[in-house]
Image (spheres, rainbow, N blue to C red):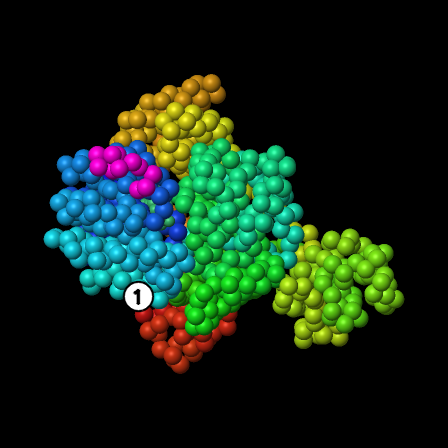
Amino acid sequence: MIDIQKDILKKYFGYDRFRKGQEEVINSILKGNDTIAIMPTGAGKSLCYQVPAMALEGITVVISPLISLMKDQVDSLNEMGIKSAYINSTLSSMEITEILFDAKDEEYKLIYVAPERLNSSEFLNFLDEADISLIAVDEAHCVSQWGHDFRPSYTRISQTIQKLDKRPIVCAFTATATNEVKNDIKNLLKLKNPNEYISGFDRENLTFSVIRGENTKKFISDFVENNKEQTGIIYTSTRKEAESIYELLIDKDYKAGIYHAGLADEQRTKMQEDFSYDNIDVIVATNAFGMGIDKSNVRYVIHNNMPKNMESYYQEAGRAGRDGEKSECILLFNPKDIQTQKFFIEETIYNIDRKEYEYKRLQDMIDYCHTSNCLRKYILEYFGEENIEDKCGNCSVCNDNEEKEDITVLAQKIISCVYRMKERYGSILIAQVLRGSKNQKLLNFGLDKLSTYAIVKEYTVKEIQEIINKLIADDYLVLSQGQYPVVKMNNKSIEVLKGNENVFMKINKKVKKISKTDNDLFDILKEFRKEISTRENIPPYIVFSDASLKEMSVYMPENEEEFLTIKGVGQSKLEKYGEIFIDKINEYRKNNNIGTRETKQEKENKKEKIKSHVITLNMYNENKTVEEIANERDIAETTVKEHLFRCAIEGMEVDLDELLPDEYERQIEEAVNRVGYNALKPIKENLPDEISYFHIKVFLHKVKG
Ligand code: ADP
Ligand code: MG
């Protein structure tokens, strides 16, 4: 059985290596163990049961809640030469009978079904008669009432399995990491001594940002304008907001779509297809609705509103960058979102305990929107990871290098106006008073007599209102509850008024531009992929992912052997598309007078010869500083340090002094004396923030070897 997994990975999926966590899960299943795997959205859970399905004799049944996903996955598998089928309500009973008939003959390696299928006696008979080696329960949190999309039919799964003559291996997958859900999965699915894997929750290619108090519509339209032709999803918490953003985008002639539970089925299917087939670039959807989509080239996910909890957020945001390419996850926070979410909780029929649980999770979400620490660290700790560096260098908090302005005086004017207006009005009226508007309502109330009337002339009413929102978002003012929220003061407002606290803020936020694969050939191949997709009636990303096209456009494979080294090219895709893509590439090469390029294999061979961390060490030994090496190699300084540390661990001679200042060493030593060195966390907690886990690890290596 040596490395049959790796062979399957290469032959069918066209990948050279497993992602974090995949191999352990696959090995566990192949050893015949029930297995539960918790991995974040986009980490690559499907492959963890698809590879075993190919390695095991017999058939794998996949239980999956979303019909649209089934079709996607089955199309995708068949493209890779893995015979599969799905059975759900979109098929006629004739078609179903036929599939089951063929399946009994082992025509298929994988069969996807919705849990409701377990109520059908025809299907149950099939399960009994066929050789079922593995049952994979995808989106297994659906079995739990604590999960966000509970599906009663999931609770029938264990009954069904118990009734089978021969019990197959059962494995379950989810991205939801709460203990309540995990225990439900184990108990309700009646897993037998399952091996449990919780893979790292980090998605390194995603950049996380929280933007507070921004005018969301303006932000979104600027963002979409700046990132035309990039694919994105915009989530809103209500249908009304989805409609209004959709209209905004359509008015500006962007290729946009909309998706929410209020649309007719056909409309939804159409939108989803348009999105899958790259006919539209951006889709606006309510987050009440799980988007049944595995589209791998989503480059950004913007949340127009704060979602109800971190699980939902991470799942939705995680739909960006499944292909592993860099992508943006942006959350636009407005204080009124808190009220919307509280309202949703109140509307539910949950009992008091459950409501309390939901309120707590909401609070964690609110805290994420306000934290002044690294967002990635917040996320990872929320999902139960430990020993996380204080700064990831890839989130809006870590990258907060845009200049903030000192707006203390302006804030004082606003706060004193709130005070003069006796904390009884909403932000519009406050802004109008400050601006000196002649609005009738304002005049009727005699608000033009206030000393704060017309004291802010340099901003429009709308702008002042936005600044008030930002002050609220940053806790310098509060918004009352209820249908007509009014702006009130808190302790912080008073400190600002007294001049004890200064307020810094970014008034004009620059909108980010996602870097594009800037290369003609990539665009040509993308166009070509679209033609094939239309002809074959499968979404473009199933033909080839963006990551595959990117590699093709860089390495320009000249023959089949080279083509096979491209990420995502397995045997079946080589046979199907190899020749036509190589022709396209050669044509481009000829037209542009490009000679032979270094192939991927050559590049990898070179890499093999001298490993990256060793290159770093060699430079370090030439007396280059960490900073110089980082600049020269275009990598982060933290990476340079990690490299050097790795060399040390691997037994190379490294002078670790630059990595660990004497002063830190002394402090860590003291902390270790106090709490011992068995766990990193207590040591870290006993030290100032600037001493990182990395420093501690270096120290421990020095003393323990
Ligand atoms: P999840 O179900 O965990 O959200 P998926 O199974 O949909 O994630 O996988 C996300 C993407 O990652 C897919 O496009 C898949 O082809 C890709 N992928 C999975 N494993 C690997 C791997 N080992 N190397 C490269 N890409 C992978
Ligand atoms: Mg999945």
User: Considering depth in this image, is 65 or 6 the residue closer to the camera?
Assistant: 65
**Residue 151 lies in the magenta-colored region:** no
Report the residue at 50% width, 46% height from top. 262
- In terms of image quadrants, where is residue 434? bottom right
Q: Is residue 506 visible?
A: yes
Report the residue at 25% width, 50% height from top. 119
Q: In the image, is 285 to the left or to the right of 444?
A: left
- Boundaries of the magenta span: 88-98
Q: In the image, is 55 to the left or to the right of 496?
A: left
Looking at the picture, how far across and down is residue 186, in whole percent? 27, 63
**Residue 96 lies in the magenta-colored region:** yes
With respect to residue 595, does 233 lie above or below?
below
Q: In the image, is 128 to the left or to the right of 647?
A: left
Report the residue at 31% width, 64% height from top. 184
User: Considering depth in this image, is 420 or 226 the residue closer to the camera?
Assistant: 420
Instruction: Tell me the quarter of the image containing the C terminus.
Output: bottom left
Secondary structure under tag 1 reads helix
Report the residue at 34% width, 49% height from top. 65
**Within-10-Å neighbours for mark 1: few <14, some 14–19, many 20+:** few
Q: What is the three-letter code of the residue carrying label 1? A: Asn
Q: Is residue 330 visible?
A: no
